Image: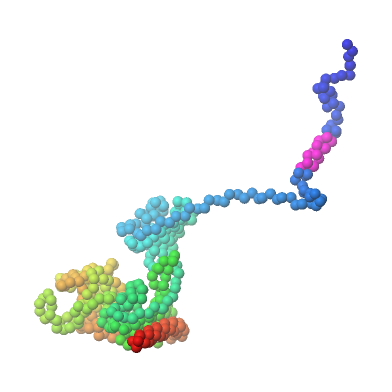
Amino acid sequence: MATNTDFQPPHKSAVGFKKKLKPGRWVALFAVAVCVVLSVLLLRGGASFSPEGKQEPLPVAAPVVPPAPPEPVYAEIKNTVPSGSSITALLGEYFTDQEIYHLNQQSDAVFPFTKICAGNPYKIVTLDGEFSSFIYEIDAEEQLVISREADQINMERQPILYDVVTEVIHGTIESSLFDAIAAIDESPELAYVLADIFGWDINFILDIRVGDTFQALVEKRFREGQWAGYGKVLAAEFVNQGETFKAIRFKDGDQATSFYNEKGENMRKTFLKVPLSFTRISSGFTMHRFHPILKSWKSHPAIDYVAPVGTPIKTVGDGSIYRIGYTKGNGNFIEVRHSNGYATIYLHMKGFARGLKKGTRVSQGQVIGYLGGTGMATGPHLCFRMRHNGAPVNPTKLKAPAAKSVSAEHLAEFQALAAPLLAQLEDKRDHQQVAKLDLSQETSATDHL
């Protein structure tokens, strides 16, 4: 059999071919391969062409948007402070014992926790189950806020923010101030406010008459769309037995805010007309009265006011407590000494306000006790007495001097403030009179039919 000595197995031929290539040619082949690959990639990722040969923009890939973080879970716990509660009971779930201890120390300079009152509202806010803030309403004007930011705990007092609407209200007395307020769909709170403003000039027990009228330019406050009570009374007017009393709210420099009449004279007098609100007199000032218990004729240099048990009793003027205690005849009583030789005595009280003792300074209108029937009394009432240099004084006949008028330094400022406020009251009164006139004319026309 013939043989071909030039024939090599394929694998040997490939090996032989590899051995015949020089190193420089391998580099060239590698470069060609790289160029081919890049060309293919450029053709695939480059611009495309329309059939007409025009270059068209390539579609742009949408940016990769990372997923949004989950929304924090916000929660509120609203409640009122239960009786006998403490800051530990309220916040012990969110703070350690050491943190509660430091909060107590910090509160002394902001708002002592011992003053937290049962019944006042509070709110606890959490984020993702973790404590964020504690908000306690101190009163209608301020709130205590405790908040945590990282490892920092903050505590401060903040004003309560309201939505405020200013409105002129108007009413006419048919039986009492309370009934007149209710007739115009206003809160009984407004009756107390008006009595406080005009209480130095008008005795709301003895002086009120049917047909008396009142007006007030008052702020009405709302929180989250809900009624939240009255704010400031900016100006008011009360017509009592034909006599008009006007009052404008004003702060005279560094002095406390007070009410002044249109002349700038202070509405505040040395003494209030009465020591409690909206009662009736069961026994007046007399030097000859038959005592219902002793069954004998005795002097009664006092005024007896009847009201529900627990009605707050207010001191009628600034002074200091001279005597406080209990006797068989007087029951629980307090004697307050005032300036210029005056003294007032409050008898048969159910109990005293907190923190009072002999020597304690008290302010006009401050609650000093609560109406009761202790001692020699036939029923719950307040026996109120006034003396001047030891001699009995009839409180209903006393003409007390007024406090300081607006200072000359701020009189122009007061007048500029008072004028537009009183104008609003006058406009309201004019509209009321026109409405009454129209109503009377309609009634008269009907009578002729």
Point out the residue furthest to the left here. 295
Residue 96 appears at what percent x and percent y?
40, 51
Q: Please tell me in which quadrant of the rendered image residue 154 appears.
A: bottom left
Residue 274 appears at what percent x and percent y?
27, 78
Left or right: 394 in relation to 91: left
132 shown above or below 335? above
The residue lying at 29 percent from left, 83 percent from top is: 210
135 shown above or below 291? above
Please provide the residue range marked out in magenta: 28-41
The residue lying at 83 percent from left, 27 percent from top is: 18
The residue lying at 26 percent from left, 71 percent from top is: 311
Q: Is residue 324 visible?
A: no
Left or right: 301 in relation to 167: left
Residue 317 appears at what percent x and percent y?
29, 78
Left or right: 198 in relation to 346: right
Residue 337 appears at what percent x and percent y?
26, 77
What's the colour scheme?
Answer: rainbow
